[in-house]
Amino acid sequence: MQTKHFKRRIIVAGAVAFLVAGIAPSSPWLTAARAVSSARLGDLGKFRAIAQVTAVLVDAGDLAGGKKRIKDLKKSWDEAEAGLKPRAATEWHVIDKAIDKALDALRVIPPDAAACKRAMVELLAALDKAQAK
């Protein structure tokens, strides 16, 4: 019962944010919930940019280069943990696990290109979902 009310509050808060900003969402319930989530986590653009470069390297078959960039992403993500995690711990953990999965895929000897590509797609999707573009 209490969880139901909490979800309603999140949706209402998101709808109010849209009204204040003058934005008309296409799906008010889903979009409002995402807006509240992304507002809490903040701008993930720099992390997504590193993930995108990593995905391009992996798609091009440069798994060694991808491994280096995903390590850079993990380092940046961990350094930002103190500022991000308290804002939205659930979303932070989802992205952290996706980064770890991509890192693990690229560290396997020999790395499986298909598994690396899947891990990068999932990581980018997690970042996009948290950012709620």
Image (cartoon, rainbow, N blue to C red):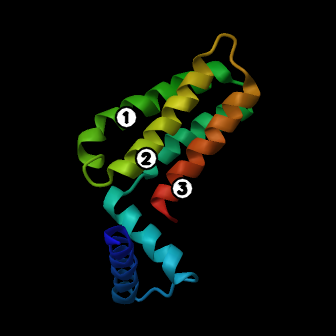
The reply to whether discs 3 and 1 touch (Cβ–Cβ < 8 Å) is: no
Element type at marker 2? helix
Residue 114 badge? none
Residue behind mark 2: 46
Residue type at mark 1: give it: Ser
* Structural crowding at the residue carrying mark 2, measured as other residues with C-alpha within 10 Å and reported as few (<14), some (14–19) or many (≥20): few
Q: Is residue 23 left or right of residue 62?
A: left
Q: Is residue 25 left or right of residue 105?
A: left
Give the quarter of the image for residue 53: top right
Task: Decide: is 68 above or below 51.
Answer: above
**Residue 78 location in percent, x, y?**
34, 33
Residue lying at 34% horizontally and 76% vertically, measured from the top left: 5
Residue lying at 51% horizontally and 50% vertically, measured from the top left: 127
Q: Nearer the viewer, mark 2 or mark 3?
A: 3
Residue behind mark 1: 76
Give the quarter of the image for residue 47: top left
What is the CA distance from the residue labelled 1 to the residue labelled 2?
Answer: 9 Å
Q: Quadrant of the N terminus?
A: bottom left
Nearer to us in this view, 55 or 4: 4
The reply to whether discs 1 and 2 touch (Cβ–Cβ < 8 Å) is: yes
What is the CA distance from the residue labelled 2 to the residue labelled 3?
Answer: 12 Å
**Residue 104 location in percent, x, y?**
56, 23
Task: Decide: is 81 above or below 30.
Answer: above
**Residue 26 location in percent, x, y?**
58, 83
Residue type at mark 3: give it: Asp
Element type at marker 1? helix
